[in-house]
Amino acid sequence: MTGLTPSQLQSLGQQLRLERTRVEERLKLHVGDAVEGGDHPADEMDVATRAEEQAYLLKLADKERKLLREIDAALERLAAGSYGVCEGTGEPIGFKRLHARPWARQSVAYKEEQERIQRGFTRT
C-alpha cells in the first residue's frame, strides 16, 4: 500500500523515535530557560530584554510542542499501518520525503498544490 519495505519502515520508526527524544530535550531546555528566575534585573532595559528573551524562548517551545505532536501522530500511523500514505490523495509518500521529514502527512506534489491554492494560484 505504501510502497515502503519493512526495513524502510523500521528505519523511519527509529528516526521518528530519535527525533522525538531530541525535540523533548529542546522543549525542556527552552521552557527551563524561559522560566529561569536568575537575578532580578537592575533596570527597565534589563527587564524589557529579559521579557523579549522569554517570549522568544516560549515561541521556540511552542514550535517544539507542535513538532512533538506531529511526530507522535506519525508514530501512531506507523503502529496503525497507515504511515506513508498521503492524507490528501491516499497515494504513497515517497521514501525520500519521509526520510527527510519522517512526520510528513502529505506527498510533495499534494503539499505544493495546496500551497499554490493558498497563494491563489491553480494548476492549468
Image (cartoon, rainbow, N blue to C red):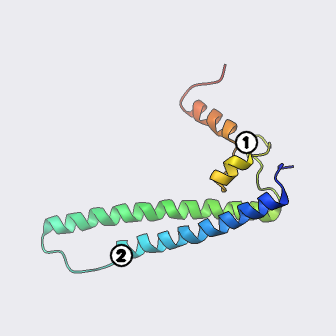
Q: Quadrant of residue 47?
A: bottom left
Amino acid under label 2?
A: Val
Which residue, given by chain and number where applicable, does mark 2 sit on? 35
The extreme right residue here reads 1
Instruction: Say if residue 105 shows up in the picture.
Output: no
Which element carries disc 1, helix, strand or loop?
loop
Left or right: 37 in relation to 57: left
Q: Residues within 10 Å of mark 2 (few under 14, many from 20)?
A: few
Q: Quadrant of residue 124?
A: top right
Is 88 above or below relative to 98? above
Q: Position of residue 100 (x, y in %)?
A: 63, 52
Q: Position of residue 112 (x, y in %)?
A: 62, 35
Question: Number of marks in the image?
Answer: 2
Q: Position of residue 36 (x, y in %)?
A: 33, 78
For image coordinates 26% across by 80% down, the residue present is 38
Q: CA distance from mark 1 to mark 2?
A: 40 Å
Instruction: Say if residue 25 shows up in the picture.
Output: yes
Amino acid under label 1?
A: Gly
Q: Which mark is residue 88?
A: 1
For image coordinates 35% across by 61% down, the residue present is 56
Q: Which mark is residue 41?
A: none
Left or right: 68 in relation to 40: right
For image coordinates 77% across by 40% down, the residue present is 89
The extreme left residue here reads 43
Nearer the observer, 56 or 84: 84
